[in-house]
Image (tube, rainbow, N blue to C red):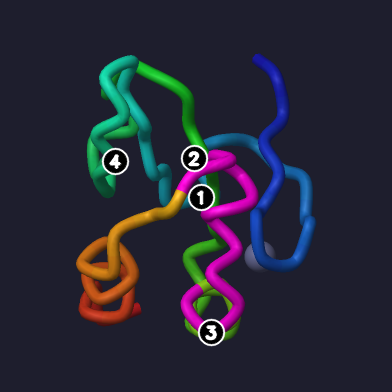
């Protein structure tokens, strides 16, 4: 099982430790609560500090080499973590 890396703090761990954000082949990005959506994934710790940092720095844009829609960042902020 490959390790995953948090897009905010760089911590490496197993995927069960992280929230997954998925980008499908057609470029649609969504928060993947199941962890099983197809496409490329980015990961964030289930930690409010990492989520806040990712939102503030828009860290996922770098992970996906794409502009992540504002509603994804809003959604992360609204997960209640
Ligand atoms: Zn982190």
Label 1 near ligand 1 (CB < 8 Å): yes
Residue 56 on image: x %, y %: 53, 84
Which of pointers 1 and 3 lies earlier in the amino acid sequence?
1
Quadrant holding ligand 1?
bottom right
Q: Which of pointers 3 and 2 lies earlier in the amino acid sequence?
A: 2
Task: Tell me which label, 4 or 3, sits earlier in the chain.
Answer: 4
* Residues at marks 1 and 4, CA–CA distance in whole angstroms: 17 Å
Relative to 49, residue 30 above or below: above
What residue sits right under mark 2 in the picture?
16
Residue labelled with disc 3: 56
Report the label total. 4
Picture layout, residue 79 above or below residue 62 = below
Query: x%, y% of residue 66?
Result: 49, 44
Q: Residues within 10 Å of mark 3 (few under 14, many from 20)?
A: few
Looking at the rendered structure, the secondary structure element under dot 4 is strand
Q: Which residues are magenta?
A: 55-66
Residue carrying label 1: 18
Is there CB contact under 8 Å for labels 2 and 1?
yes
Of callouts 4 and 2, which one flags the residue occurring earlier in the amino acid sequence? 2
User: Which mark is nearer the camera, 2 or 1?
Assistant: 1
């Amino acid at each position: 099982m490959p390790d995953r890396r948090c897009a905010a703090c760089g911590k490496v761990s197993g995927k069960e430790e992280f929230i997954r954000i998925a980008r499908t082949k057609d470029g649609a990005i969504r928060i993947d609560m199941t962890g099983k959506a197809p496409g490329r994934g980015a990961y964030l710790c289930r930690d409010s500090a990492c989520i806040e940092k990712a939102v503030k720095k828009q860290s996922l844009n770098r992970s996906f080499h794409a502009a992540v829609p504002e509603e994804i960042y809003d959604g992360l902020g609204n997960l209640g973590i």
